[in-house]
């Protein structure tokens, strides 16, 4: 039987969190066993689905996260920003997740203000590495494109 108190607590944490996400390890730590964890997750997915929301799991900087997403468009994101995000995801799908900032500034020079806005809104993240600064798509960014992310590749996007 699913621990209803824990399910309610995790739901509250996800819904009250400004970003709508939580580390998978934190969820595991709140569960008393792997069995409880394996029961809680499907229940959370079902509960959020009943509310018209989605709970997805994604990886970011070596950690797995659960992210609550809503259907439809984020009102803070312009159509141009969605297009820029789609191009960044397609680029990441093609060449890998570590997008070099210097190279991306050259490629996306005409829409760099969109990239900066996406960073501010936490759809993208800047990371310092030995090789320089990299852009990564955050769990929130991945969540916004959850239904089309696998289909985004440079060939498909360039044919639009």
Image: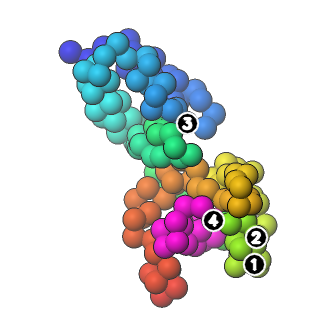
The reply to whether discs 2 and 1 touch (Cβ–Cβ < 8 Å) is yes
Residue at image point 58% right, 50% down: 138
Residue at which label 4 appears: 99
Residue at which label 3 appears: 20
Q: Secondary structure at mark 3?
A: loop
> Real-space Cα distance between discs 4 and 2?
9 Å
In x, y percent, where is residue 147? 40, 59
> Real-space Cα distance between discs 4 and 1?
12 Å
In x, y percent, where is residue 120? 75, 51
Q: Secondary structure at mark 2?
A: helix
**Mark found first going from the N terminus, 1 or 3:** 3
The reply to whether residue 36 is visible in this rendering is: yes
The reply to whether residue 4 is visible in this rendering is: no
Residue at which label 2 appears: 102
The numbered disc on residue 106 is 1
Q: Main secondary structure of the magenta part?
A: helix
**Mark found first going from the N terminus, 4 or 1:** 4
Q: Is residue 25 magenta?
A: no
Q: In which quarter of the view is residue 98 placed? A: bottom right
Q: Badge 2: how crowded within 10 Å, few (<14), some, or many (20+)?
A: few
The reply to whether discs 2 and 3 touch (Cβ–Cβ < 8 Å) is no
Q: Nearer the viewer, mark 2 or mark 3?
A: 2
| Magenta-drawn segment | 82-99
């Amino acid at each position: 039987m699913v621990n209803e108190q824990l399910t309610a607590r995790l739901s509250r944490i996800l819904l009250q969190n400004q970003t709508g996400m939580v580390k998978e390890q934190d969820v595991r730590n709140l569960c008393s066993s792997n069995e409880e964890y394996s029961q809680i997750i499907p229940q959370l997915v079902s509960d959020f689905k009943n509310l018209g929301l989605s709970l997805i799991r994604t990886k970011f900087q070596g950690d797995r996260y659960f992210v609550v997403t809503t259907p439809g468009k984020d009102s803070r994101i312009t159509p141009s920003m969605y297009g820029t995000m789609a191009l960044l995801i397609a680029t990441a799908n093609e060449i890998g997740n570590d997008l070099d900032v210097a190279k991306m500034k050259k490629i996306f020079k005409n829409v760099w203000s969109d990239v900066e806005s996406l960073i501010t809104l936490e759809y993208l993240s800047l990371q310092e590495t030995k090789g320089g600064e990299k852009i990564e798509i955050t769990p929130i960014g991945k969540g916004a494109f959850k239904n089309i992310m696998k289909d985004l590749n440079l060939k498909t996007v360039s044919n639009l």
